[in-house]
Image (spheres, helix red, strand yellow):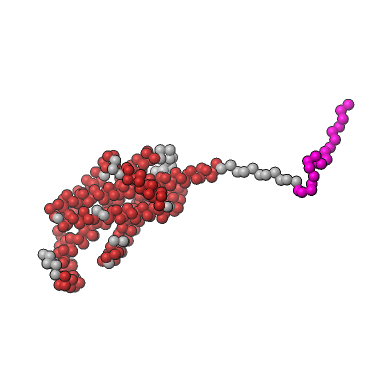
Amino acid sequence: MMRPIANAFVHALGQVLLPRVIGMTLLPLLAMTVVALGLGYFFWGGAVEAMRAGLQGWALTGWLDGHLRLGWPGGLAALLAPMLVVALATPVIVLTSLVVVSMLMTPALTRLVAERRFLQLARLRGASLLGSIGWSAGSLLLAIVALLLSMPLWLIPPLVLILPPLIWGWLTYRVMSFDALAEHASQEERVTILRQHRAALLTIGIVSGYLGAAPSVVWASGVLFAALFAVLVPLAIWIYTLVFVFSSLWFAHYCLEALRQLRASREGAATTPVPAATPALPPAGAGSVSDVPFKELPREF
């Protein structure tokens, strides 16, 4: 299972820095940067202040503040408030990046992969645009519900490093594998590939989920260094976009190769000649062919 995953990874890595691909990331980057900076301008101060007030009213925060004595201006609540706001905003940014990349860029990236590696692969168009939107919307809704239900568990240190990437990975697997096969595979082929390669596709999705969590460091740096916030936030959003572009290429290479192998195996099974039946030999003791009596032909006069 790991060899096809690694092979698709290498091919995706070789294409993600192409000028054509980098150019594709600029439009989603511009749109999401404008939205993020606008929301931050109007709601950042109020969100941090509301979080700080909530933490100050929490008995555990007061107990920790008294014992740790960090000396931070405003206490532990003032230190944790912006970090928790970032923790809540990060899933929104990640999910938005995933949906934007999937809807606007995955079809173009899949065509790029097909042009370079799978030019002879027939396009059966087993999924429509509405079908893709419905699949993505349903998967996104399930992911949001899972994120909301799992948030109380994020307070447990190990789980905050496990649960969000797992949920993002599952969503990435669901959305990008569907879109990678939408144009080339029939509905039956897509269902077959998603069933037969579920473990491999989920592995790619989970790795992509952890890669998508990495830019949170840059996003959090914008909180700690307010002077660079306007620079670091677009940088973090662009990294998110680039990570998901790479994931889209990764899924496209793996899924189209799986589709090529599926069709090749079916064509091979259809063209394999059926061996001819072996003539039955006479039973033992029946004598040779010359021993078989024949009817004497009539004499000609």
Q: Is residue 186 left or right of residue 18?
A: right
Identify whether 291 is placed above or below 61.
above
Label count reads: 0
Identify whether 74 is placed above or below 271.
below
Q: Is residue 62 visible?
A: no
| Point 30% across, 44% down: residue | 16
Residue sticking out furthest to the top: 301
Query: x and y percent of residue 287 in the render?
Result: 80, 45
The residue nearer to you, when weighing 104 against 220, is 220
| Point 16% across, 50% down: residue | 230
Query: x and y percent of residue 268 in the render?
Result: 52, 43
Query: x and y percent of residue 56 in the render?
Result: 16, 69
Q: Main secondary structure of the magenta part?
A: loop
Query: x and y percent of residue 154 in the render?
Result: 27, 64
| Point 24% across, 48% down: residue | 238
Q: Is residue 97 visible?
A: yes
The part of the chain drawn in magenta is: 283-301
Identify whether 152 is placed above or below 260.
below
| Point 39% across, 40% down: residue | 117
Q: Is residue 292 magenta?
A: yes
Residue sticking out furthest to the right: 301
The residue nearer to you, when weighing 12 against 114, is 12
Classify residue 155 by image quadrant: bottom left
The residue nearer to you, when weighing 211 against 37, is 211
Q: Where, quadrant-wise, is the C terminus in this rendering?
A: top right
Classify residue 253 by image quadrant: top left
